[in-house]
């Protein structure tokens, strides 16, 4: 079985911020899902369509789109990396590692 290590700051900082303050539990769920699917050596990127994320998280596609927009605004996903249908790449950002 694959073991996933989760930085405590994801829970301590992001969960109350995204769920309690922003009222965006879907954004927290999408962030955790994408974080779990990053591969070592991939520079924290995930190549996955909106529909796949929706299906695997149980969210609607529109909820995933809204969550991704929010995560980009919050700089938790790279806002400069534009995912396309042929290259649905998203890059996880960890602001706490860069002093942000």
Image (cartoon, helix red, strand yellow):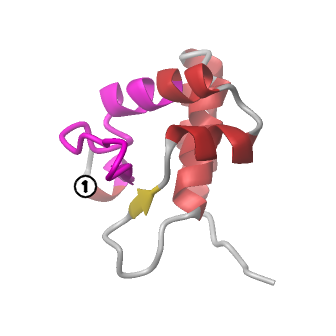
Q: Is residue 48 magenta?
A: no
- State whether residue 71 appears in this view: yes
Q: Does residue 54 sit above or below 73 in this rendering? A: below
Report the residue at 43% width, 58% height from top.
47
Q: Which residues are magenta?
A: 67-96
Q: Looking at this rendering, what residue extends furthest in the right direction?
A: 1
Quadrant containing the N terminus in the rendered view: bottom right
Report the residue at 73% width, 81% height from top.
2
Report the residue at 59% width, 39% height from top.
51
Which residue has dot 1 on it? 98
Residue 73 horizontal/vertical position (percent)? 32, 25
Position of 51 with respect to 99 (left or right) is right
**Secondary structure beneath disc 1?**
helix
Q: Does residue 26 sit above or below 100 in this rendering? A: above
Task: Pick whichever, 61 or 2, lies toward us.
Answer: 61
Residue 6 horizontal/vertical position (percent)? 62, 64
- The picture quadrant where one finds residue 82 is top left
Residue 32 horizontal/vertical position (percent)? 60, 49
Q: Does residue 98 sit above or below 54 in this rendering? A: below
- State whether residue 12 appears in this view: no
Residue 21 horizontal/vertical position (percent)? 57, 17
């Amino acid at each position: 079985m694959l073991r996933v290590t989760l930085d405590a700051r994801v829970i301590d900082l992001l969960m109350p911020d995204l769920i309690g303050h922003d009222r965006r539990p879907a954004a927290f769920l999408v962030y955790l899902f994408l974080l779990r699917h990053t591969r070592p050596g991939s520079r924290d990127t995930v190549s996955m369509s909106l529909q796949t994320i929706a299906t695997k998280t149980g969210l609607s596609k529109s909820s995933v789109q809204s969550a991704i927009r929010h995560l980009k605004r919050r700089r938790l996903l790279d806002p400069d990396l534009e995912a396309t249908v042929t290259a649905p790449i998203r890059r996880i950002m960890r602001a706490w590692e860069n002093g942000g």
